[in-house]
Image (cartoon, rainbow, N blue to C red):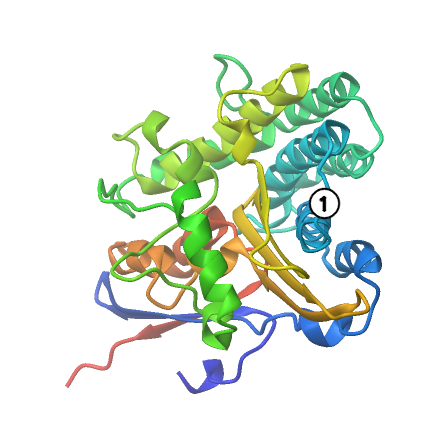
Amino acid sequence: MSELREMSTSIGVEVTRIEERVGEAKVMPRRQVDATRLLRGKAANDAPRLIGSIFTLCAASQLVASEAAVAAAQSLHLSDALRWRWRRMLYAERVAEHLRASMLDWPGEKSDPRRLAHLPALRQALTIARAAEKEEGRSLHIALKEAASEVGAPLGDGAPRAWLGELWRDVLQNGQIAPWRERADFLAIGDVETVHLALEGRDADFLSRPHLPGRIVETGAFARHFARLSRDIGLLAARLQARFYDIAYALDALAYREPLAGEEDLVVARSSQPGEGFAMVDSPRGFLFHRVELDASGAVKTYDILAPTEWNFHPAGPFVEALAAAKLNVGDPRRIVATLAALFDPCASYDIRLLEAQHA
């Protein structure tokens, strides 16, 4: 695994194939954003906008998490108006990011005319989501629903169409490649305090390799909709189905003027001591954690960010577990590995190395 030893901004994935199965699967975590280095000495109120400008993917979630963590550190009251603004931003971003991942990150020829035909709808969705901070939920719902429908999202009882219909046929054809496993463990609201304590301990390894003792946990759309997923279509299709459900759920949420059941857990903010703030945001890809410490002048002293990708692509995490159980008895095994990775939806690029085991 020599090429994967140096940490980069990409996730390293190395698969050794023995005949038609995975003999060994390894993941090298990506290099982390050093938020403390970027923000130390900056005024706390400037941190959210700086954070929001750093990240290309899930920028709204990063902004909201930073605003919530800083507010907790300053012991500020979170008004209903502020929480409603966060709600609009997060649900709009959830729709746009799922469409982005499905359009841009899916393996295959990037110049495929079927893909290119729907890029205008994706650009529309991304533009709409970026305006969610100021737009009303109802208008957001209408505009995003139009964009999602254009790409082929199955809203209501319909089947996937257009580009998303192509992806659906793809995963159904490979239904037995990655078997469904009933055993699953997901990050939950009850785990938030444990993560808070771990970040307070300033364990650098926890930021790149987060773990809960004795557990292999996942977060994201698959976790949110696990109970609804079809068990007889294979893991690849079930993961894409979860993405479809999440798009529809977020659109429904934007259509309502009242919070949905359980929505109080969309953003959690708390403080363990004066000048310390912690926040969890249920971002498109799952639980996103921010923690900040302020100095006596109110400037940033330390700042930590723990993204969902670090849980899902942990070296001993759920992606590796699913990959190890996959069958690679296909003409293009690399594409199957890439498809599985895309369905775990990292907020980073990934480099895949496929090796053939040497026989004696």
In the picture, measured across the screen, residue 324 lies left or right of residue 206, that is left
Residue 170 visible? The answer is no
SS for callout 1? helix
State which quadrant residue 25 falls in: bottom left
User: The C terminus is located in which quarter?
Assistant: bottom left
- Whether residue 85 sits left or right of residue 198 in the image: it is right
Residue 301 seen in the current view: yes
Q: How many labels does the image show?
A: 1
Image coordinates for residue 133, horizontal then vertical, percent: 80, 35
Residue at position x 51%, y 54% in the image: 308
Q: Quadrant of residue 13?
A: bottom left
Give coordinates of residue 147: x percent, y percent.
71, 26
Question: Residue 348, image x and y in percent?
Answer: 59, 60
- Residue type beneath disc 1: Ala
Q: Mark 1 points at which residue?
A: 60
Of all residues, the one furthest to the left in this rendering is 360
Q: Nearer the viewer, residue 293 or 314?
A: 293
Q: In this view, does 342 lie above or below 227?
A: below
Viewport quadrant of the N terminus:
bottom left
Q: Position of residue 245 (x, y in %)?
A: 48, 27
Q: Residue at x 29, y 62 (%)?
A: 213
Q: Quadrant of residue 173?
A: top left
Q: Is residue 268 left or right of residue 176?
A: right
Toward the viewer: 20 or 353?
353
The front one of 352 and 74 is: 74
- Could you tell whether 61 is left or right of 216 in the image? right
10 Å crowding of disc 1: few (<14), some (14-19), many (20+) = many
